[in-house]
Image (spheres, rainbow, N blue to C red):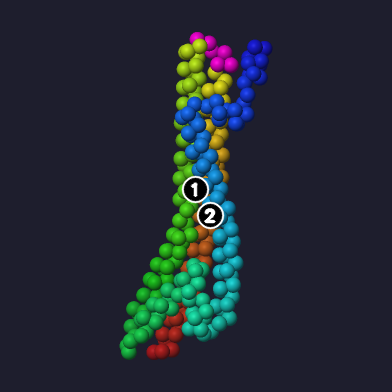
């Protein structure tokens, strides 16, 4: 009965737990909360960004398939910031450089075209994945940071027991509650970050494969153009 009354006397609301926490636990909670906010900012912004890029890519592919004039299409789309447009622009730029002379090294031109577009695909994929490393870091580190807060809170509970020479729930509960609260914040930051990172990595791999298929098709088109010029 005394344990129940003691437990009821302690306020376990998150705000109270934070205000009553040790400065180390407060620092842990603030750091994890900021990491969680930034992780959700990345999750929302990346979701919107990839939706926009996919819609623009579908339109680009339709327009490219309906246009037989490569130079004319380049004039209208060559300076676009869309990743697929940049791959296309890299192929056209290498094509113009390689076919600018009187003699054309066809095998070398094909190889340089593939290299230029593959390098652009890698660069664009890295650019899209730039901020995803934070999600991976948060997902792997946040639980351990929360665990540090847990350990510190439990140590504080044992210190309170030693100081009060009393192991009642009223003495132990605040420190344990702070410890568990830090653990909960750590998991709250880590779980969405891990799920989002895995999901976004899969979507990036799909988009990279889409860019690769476009580059292969465009490479075939330019290869046929080389044969006609021969």
Q: Which mark is residue 135?
A: 1
Which quadrant would residue 67 be assigned to in this image? bottom right
Distance between the alpha carbons at the discs numbered 1 and 2: 10 Å
Q: Residue furthest front?
A: 19
Residue 151 visible from this viewpoint? no
| Relative horizontal placement of residue 68, taking residue 230 as reference (left or right) | right
Q: Which mark is residue 188?
A: none
Measuring 47% from the left and 17% from the top, which residue is drawn there?
Answer: 159
* Magenta span includes 168: yes
Instruction: Tell me which segment is drawn in magenta.
Output: 165-171
Measuring 32% from the left and 89% from the top, which residue is drawn there?
Answer: 102
Per the image, label 1 sits on a secondary structure element best described as: helix
The answer to whether residue 20 is above or below residue 98 is above
Which residue is nearer to you in this view: 224 or 207? 207
| Relative horizontal placement of residue 10, taking residue 106 as reference (left or right) | right
Q: Position of residue 77 (x, y in %)?
A: 51, 76
Q: Position of residue 90 (x, y in %)?
A: 42, 74
Q: Position of residue 145 (x, y in %)?
A: 47, 35
Q: Which residue is mark 2?
A: 200
**For discs 1 and 2, the disc positioned in front in the rendered view:** 1
Measuring 49% from the left and 69% from the top, which residue is drawn there?
Answer: 81
In the rendered structure, are the residues bearing label 1 and label 2 in contact, judged by CB atoms less than 8 Å apart? yes
Q: Position of residue 106 (x, y in %)?
A: 36, 82
Q: Earlier in the sequence, mark 1 or mark 2?
A: 1
């Amino acid at each position: 009965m005394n344990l129940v009354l003691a437990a009821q006397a302690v306020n376990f609301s998150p705000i109270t737990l934070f205000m009553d926490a040790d400065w180390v636990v407060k620092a842990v909670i603030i750091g994890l909360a900021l990491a969680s906010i930034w992780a959700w900012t990345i999750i929302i912004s990346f979701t919107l960004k990839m939706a926009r890029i996919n819609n623009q890519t579908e339109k680009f592919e339709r327009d490219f398939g309906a246009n037989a004039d490569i130079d004319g299409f380049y004039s209208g789309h060559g300076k676009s910031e869309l990743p697929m447009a940049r791959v296309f622009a890299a192929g056209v730029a290498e094509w113009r450089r390689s076919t600018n002379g009187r003699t054309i090294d066809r095998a070398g031109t094909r190889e340089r075209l593939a290299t230029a577009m593959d390098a652009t695909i890698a660069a664009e994929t890295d650019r899209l994945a730039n901020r995803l490393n934070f999600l991976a870091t948060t997902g792997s580190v946040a639980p351990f940071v929360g665990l540090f807060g847990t350990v510190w809170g439990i140590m504080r509970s044992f210190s309170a027991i030693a100081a009060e020479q009393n192991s009642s729930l009223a003495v132990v509960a605040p420190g344990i509650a702070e410890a568990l609260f830090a653990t909960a914040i750590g998991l709250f930051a880590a779980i969405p970050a891990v799920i989002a990172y895995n999901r976004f990595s899969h979507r990036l791999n799909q988009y990279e494969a889409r860019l690769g298929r476009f580059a292969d098709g465009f490479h075939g088109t330019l290869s046929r153009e080389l044969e006609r010029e021969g």
